[in-house]
Amino acid sequence: MKVKLAIQMDAISAIDIKGDTTFALALEAQARGYEIFYYEPDHLRMAVGTDDKVEIIAALAPLKVQDVVGAHYELGAASPTDLRTMDVVLMRQDPPFDMAYIAATHFLEKIHPETLVVNAPFAVRNAPEKLWVLDYPDLTPPTLLSRDRHAITAFRARHKDIILKPIFGNGGAGIFRVQAGDENFGALLDMFLAGTREPFIAQAYLPAIRAGDKRLILIDGEAAGALNRVPQAGEARANVHIGGVPEAVALDERDYEIAARIGPALRDVGIILAGVDIIGGLVTEVNVTSPTCIREIKALGGADLAVAVWDAIEKKL
C-alpha cells in the first residue's frame, strides 16, 4: 500500500533508538515503502487560508531511517504542507500532557478521520492516562484523586503505605512512595499543593511492584504483547529509562481478561496503540499518548509489534 505518512514527534536527533517505539514504527513504515515525513509539534499551525478554509499546516521534512546508533536518520528540506495531503499522521510526541499537548489534539482533530490520526486526537484528549482506568474500578488499586489535604490524609491513614503522583505526569517523574510513619508526608503535600492547581493522585502501594510493572500492549483493542519492568533495589518506579530492568514475559490469563474489558472501549474511540500498566494483576495506567516498549519486546525475542500496528492502520485506510 502506498501511504504518505507524517510523524509528529519530539526531536529525532535526541531519541534512543534502542528503546524508541516511534523509531520502530518509522522503520516498519519505511520497509513497507511509505513516503515518510517528520515534524516537531512546534512546527504545527492552524490558519484560515485564502479560500476561507481552515488549514492544518506543518513544516514537513522527508525522513529516512536506519537502525544504526548515531546515524539513525536523514532529513530533507522542510516545507510547509497541508496535513490533509497525508494519509496518516502519527501523533507521537511524549507527554507531559499539558495545554500544548491539548492544543495539538485540537489542531489534528480538524483533519481526522479524513487523514487518519493515530491515536485519534479527540480520544487522546479525553482519555488521560491515569484517569481512563478509573472507569473500571474493580481492575485498579484503591485510588484517590484530590487536592483536599484532609481527604488525602485520611486515605493515607486507611492504607498506610501509599504512592503520591501527579495526575498528568509521565516517565516516573514526581512519583513518591510514602510509608506509614514517613515524616516527609506533610512536606510532600505542601509541594504538590504549591506546585500545581490540579488534583493529584494518592494510590495504595502495591508490594507486587518488586516482581515488576508489566506493560501490556494493546493493538486495536487486542492484547498483542507484554514486557515486564523490574525496579532497582530501593526504587519504587520501574520505568526503563530510570533504571527498571526489562524482562521478557508471556501474556497470561489476567492480561487477556484486562484486554477484553478495556480494549473494546479503546478501539471504539480510535485508540489503535495503547500501553496498559499492570502491577500484581491491577491496572495503574492506560497509556494512549505515546505508548512505548515495542523495541524492548522485540529485542527480548518477542514479536515485532510495529508490524501489527501498521497492519491495523492499513485496515482502517
Image (tube, rainbow, N blue to C red):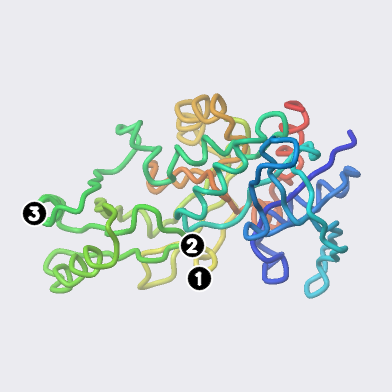
Q: Which residue is mark 2?
A: 239
Up the image or down, 167 lies above or below 49; here it is: below
For the residue pair 250 and 180, the one nearer the viewer reads as 180
State which quarter of the image contains the C terminus: top right
Q: Is residue 61 left or right of residue 215?
A: right
Judge the density around disc 1: few (<14), some (14-19), many (≥20) Cα neighbours within 10 Å: some
For the residue pair 108 and 17, the one nearer the viewer reads as 108
Query: Which amino acid type is shown beneath numbered disc 3?
Result: His
**Which residue is at 25% across, 45% downward?**
143
Residue 122 place in picture, x, y as percent: 53, 35
Are discs 2 and 1 less than 8 Å apart at CB?
yes
Q: CA distance from mark 1 to mark 3?
A: 34 Å
Are discs 1 and 3 less than 8 Å apart at CB?
no
Q: Which residue is mark 3?
A: 150
Earlier sequence position, callout 3 versus callout 2: 3
**Which residue is at 68% across, 55% downward?**
295
Q: Which residue is mark 1?
A: 243
Query: Which amino acid type is shown beneath numbered disc 1?
Result: Gly
Query: Which amino acid type is shown beneath numbered disc 2?
Result: Asn
